Image (cartoon, rainbow, N blue to C red):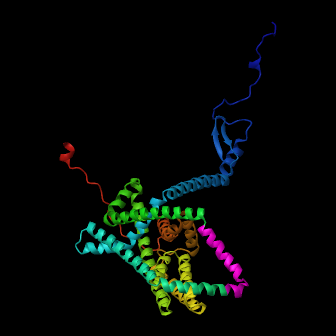
């Protein structure tokens, strides 16, 4: 019988080759080594041919997990920051309204304890605030108008003293000083620059008035219905996270109110001390200096430096270098008193923020929102510090007492059946 066409496959022993997708171990792969490597050193992934070593070490897995999560967080922060900056004409007035609420809510609570309803109490508080601020501005304007003539003479004498100091100490002659003054004057009074500045001032004034209206509007409703607004915000969170969100918000509010009230006391002490020093030295614009120091004290470090420099400059122009040196000593003494005695005593540990964090917060606030950003940067940092410590379980002070959130009124069975 011919061997042609004979099928000899049955006579040849076949290798035990596993089928694709079977669970049998491969005869050519070192499965034991692969399993140990996948368990201890590399990532092992499932495939149709069994477990495959991807070559990714555990360290790389951890690094990649941290990296993509960090990128997502950074992207979210950038989006939120861009949105807040884009809507700064709304965000800044609302923030100012919150700060004013933290300062003035005791007044509204006191009026309510005097049997005045909550709404009228909030309205009286807002009106009293407007009257006080308007009175201070009127006082400053009246003082400047009353001393304008003598102040103009003193400014002229002060400019001449500055010219003499520049000529003696820096070797500049009258021609150099006059050319510098003329170049500054030409830059300011040039047609295009003057028109552009006028347009900017008009636009800024419009934004200021609009922002002031929004801030006062928010202040009234925060004083009147603050609890209801907060309860509505809490109900936006998932049910499991509402308790933690509520406790974090209450912790932030305690920190914010403590910071604002302590800052107001410190600013008042600074203003009174420096104003008394200026009055004793016989400087002009004592009230204006005091109000400027009061406002500048809300910006730690930078505000004190600017307001103190203005007081010293007024002393230099009005009374000469000797009185300016004495005024500088008064400013430094008052600011050292509030920095080393008042602030640690009033603020305490609950709102303590590291000086480096304060400087970075102020710089960020200036970049984002200018002067207003510098004003709200430090309280924002204090609030974030309190919230982060609370969420991490590192509360310095005991948690504020819990309160029951207002719940929506359920319809009665008769109404539901109808």
Question: Can residue 409 be found in the magenta stretch?
Answer: no
* Residue 337 drawn above or below residue 390: below
Tell me if residue 399 can be seen. Answer: no
Residue 179, how many percent across, how many down?
68, 76
Residue 15, how many percent across, how many down?
74, 28
In the shown orientation, is residue 99 left or right of residue 15? left
Question: Can residue 177 be found in the magenta stretch?
Answer: yes
User: Outermost residue toward the top?
Assistant: 1
Which quarter shows the C terminus? top left
In the shown orientation, is residue 356 left or right of residue 122? right
Given residues 87 and 245, the one toward you in this image is: 87
Q: Residue placed at 73% from the left, 39% from the top? A: 29
Give the magenta range: 165-189
Tell me if residue 232 can be seen. Answer: yes
Given residues 184 and 296, the one toward you in this image is: 184
Q: Residue placed at 58% from the left, 56% from the top? A: 74
Indicate the quadrant where residue 250 lies: bottom left
Residue 117, how many percent across, how many down?
24, 68
């Amino acid at each position: 019988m011919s061997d042609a066409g004979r099928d000899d496959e049955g006579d040849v022993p076949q290798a035990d080759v596993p089928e694709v997708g079977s669970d049998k171990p491969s005869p050519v792969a070192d499965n034991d080594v692969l399993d140990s490597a996948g368990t201890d050193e590399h990532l092992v992934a499932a495939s149709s041919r069994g477990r495959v070593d991807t070559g990714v070490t555990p360290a790389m897995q951890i690094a990649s997990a941290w990296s993509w999560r960090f990128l997502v967080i950074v992207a979210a922060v950038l989006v939120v920051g861009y949105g807040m900056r884009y809507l700064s004409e709304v965000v800044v007035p609302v923030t100012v309204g919150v700060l004013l609420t933290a300062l003035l809510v005791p007044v509204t609570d006191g009026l309510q304890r005097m049997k005045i309803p909550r709404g009228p109490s909030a309205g009286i508080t807002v009106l009293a605030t407007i009257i006080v601020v308007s009175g201070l501005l009127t006082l400053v304007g009246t003082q400047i108008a009353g001393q304008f003539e003598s102040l103009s003479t003193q400014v002229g004498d002060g400019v001449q003293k500055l010219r003499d100091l520049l000529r003696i100490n820096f070797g500049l002659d009258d021609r150099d000083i006059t050319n510098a003054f003329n170049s500054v004057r030409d830059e300011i009074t040039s047609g295009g620059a003057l028109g552009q500045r006028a347009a900017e001032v008009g636009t800024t004034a419009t934004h200021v008035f609009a922002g002031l209206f929004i801030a006062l509007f928010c202040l009234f409703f925060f004083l009147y219905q603050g609890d209801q607004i907060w309860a509505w915000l809490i109900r936006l969170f998932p049910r499991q996270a509402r308790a933690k969100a509520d406790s974090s918000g209450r912790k932030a509010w305690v920190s914010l109110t403590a910071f604002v009230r302590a800052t107001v006391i410190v600013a008042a002490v600074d203003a009174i001390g420096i104003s008394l020093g200026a009055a004793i030295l016989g400087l002009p614009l004592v009230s204006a200096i005091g109000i400027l120091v009061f406002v500048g004290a809300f910006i730690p470090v930078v505000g004190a430096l600017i307001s103190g420099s203005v007081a010293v400059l007024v002393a230099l122009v009005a009374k000469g270098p000797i009185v300016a040196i004495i005024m500088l000593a008064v400013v430094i003494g008052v600011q050292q008193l509030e920095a080393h005695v008042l602030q640690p005593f009033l603020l305490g540990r609950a709102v303590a923020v590291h000086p480096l964090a304060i400087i970075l917060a102020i710089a960020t606030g200036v970049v984002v929102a200018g002067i207003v950003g510098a004003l709200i940067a430090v309280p924002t940092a204090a609030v974030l510090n309190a919230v982060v410590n609370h969420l991490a379980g590192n509360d310095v002070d005991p948690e504020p007492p819990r309160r029951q959130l207002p719940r929506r009124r359920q319809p009665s069975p008769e109404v539901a059946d109808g």
